[in-house]
């Protein structure tokens, strides 16, 4: 298992690689090129510069997040082949700089959604929050504007301006797309991408829908164990896997997150893990919290133990953190709380690992 942090390059992050390097147990970063328009090839020369910068600080760059899928691919339009070709070229370029895992999503129109990016928690810290009725009663463009206005001047992957300009038109388009058609569009993408990913030795790890229920009538596909099974069956290559985000899946009270971990990590289909906690206020309202189990409704010990017991040997990062101690930066991606979260998760892992070794030793001596 490797513990990493997400980091945004070229001045698009308040946290430096120098500081990330000082977090005990963190071996690398999951990063991206946020300024490349969706659908275009990520240039090899810029990826080399990025890798050089990361390696210079003693960190690895084996995971890339947010090579976003163009909307024409999700819609199944004739133009999708051109954008898929660009995606394949990007995968090939990523392989040339040593990338081993690519996290992406297939959410239509809207990426992750929150109603407040700086909700004040009882302890005075700030975290992201979601209130479903507020979203349902808002015009989609207002949701987008509210998200960007709270970004503190940083980019928001999934909320790129070029995507937002066509939001109303895109939402209307999907009113006439059945869930079966959407699954077919996803399969078309996977069948084109996975053979290239295999040849390049890059694991594809789709991120769950966030939150895992429909908004504005849009299709949602990676929401629970049943839907994950359907997704993995679209292409049975071991390179076709998931990013198991405990906060996204855990937002739905009906999801048994440790059971989901055991099932899919046990089959070797979890290539990346985002681990965070949430506090449910109702079935569709929640606050993000500190990672500690007692701060939310998810049992972090059981989740980490499920990963360990399943033989998970890939990448973990502490997901969204709070803003604490007066820190200001990209919502969810300050340094302090994520550093605490990383070491809390590493502590759980070490305790579980040593407990298991002690049990094995005791059995061997019996």
Image: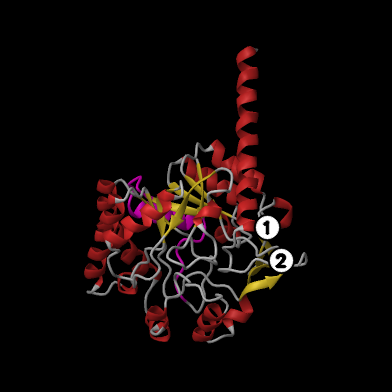
Q: Residue at x 53, y 87 (%)?
A: 139
What is the distance, in whole Å, between disc 1 and disc 2 at their CAs?
9 Å
Q: Residue at x 58, y 42 (%)?
A: 306
Q: Position of residue 231 (x, y in %)?
A: 40, 56
Span shown in magenta? 218-240
Q: Is residue 278 visible?
A: yes
207 above or below 113?
A: above
Q: Position of residue 174 (x, y in %)?
A: 39, 78
Quadrant of res 79: bottom left
Comes first in the chain, label 1 or label 2: 2
SS type, badge 2 = loop
Q: Disc 1 designates what residue? A: 290
SS type, badge 1 = loop
Camera-side residue of 315 and 48: 48
Horizontal side of residue 6 vs 99, given as left or right: right
Is residue 309 shown in magenta? no
Q: Marks 2 and 1: in contact by CB < 8 Å? A: yes
Q: Disc 2 designates what residue? A: 125
């Amino acid at each position: 298992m490797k513990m990493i942090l997400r980091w945004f390059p070229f001045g698009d992050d308040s946290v430096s690689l120098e500081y990330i390097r000082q977090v005990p147990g963190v071996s690398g970063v999951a990063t991206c090129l946020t300024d490349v328009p969706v659908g275009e090839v990520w240039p090899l020369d810029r990826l080399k510069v990025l890798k050089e910068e990361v390696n210079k600080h003693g960190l690895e760059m084996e995971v890339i997040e947010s090579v976003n899928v163009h909307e024409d691919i999700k819609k199944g339009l004739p133009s999708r082949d051109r954008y898929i070709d660009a995606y394949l070229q990007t995968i090939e370029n990523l392989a040339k700089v040593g990338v081993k895992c690519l996290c992406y999503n297939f959410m239509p129109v809207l990426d992750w959604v929150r109603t407040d990016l700086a909700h004040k928690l009882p302890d005075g810290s700030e975290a992201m929050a979601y209130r479903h009725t507020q979203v349902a009663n808002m015009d989609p463009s207002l949701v987008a504007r509210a998200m960007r206005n709270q970004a503190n001047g940083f980019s928001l992957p999934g909320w790129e301006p070029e995507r937002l300009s066509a939001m109303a038109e895109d939402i209307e388009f999907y009113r006439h797309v059945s869930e079966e058609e959407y699954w077919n569009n996803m399969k078309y993408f996977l069948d084109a991408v996975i053979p290239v990913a295999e040849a390049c030795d890059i694991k594809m790890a789709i991120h769950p829908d966030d939150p895992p229920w429909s908004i504005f009538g849009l299709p949602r596909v990676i929401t629970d164990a049943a839907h994950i099974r359907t997704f993995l069956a679209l292409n049975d290559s071991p390179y076709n896997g998931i990013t198991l985000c405990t906060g996204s899946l855990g937002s739905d009270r009906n999801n048994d997150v440790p059971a989901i971990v055991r099932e899919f990590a046990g089959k070797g289909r979890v290539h990346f893990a985002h681990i965070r906690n949430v506090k449910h206020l109702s079935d569709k309202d929640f606050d993000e919290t500190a990672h500690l189990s007692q701060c939310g409704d998810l049992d972090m010990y059981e989740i980490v133990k499920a990963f360990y017991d399943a033989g998970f040997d890939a990448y973990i990062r502490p997901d969204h953190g709070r803003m604490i101690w007066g820190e200001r930066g990209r919502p969810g991606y300050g340094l302090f709380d994520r550093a605490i979260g990383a070491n809390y998760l590493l502590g759980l892992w070490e305790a579980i690992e040593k407990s298991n070794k002690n049990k094995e030793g005791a059995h061997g001596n019996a």
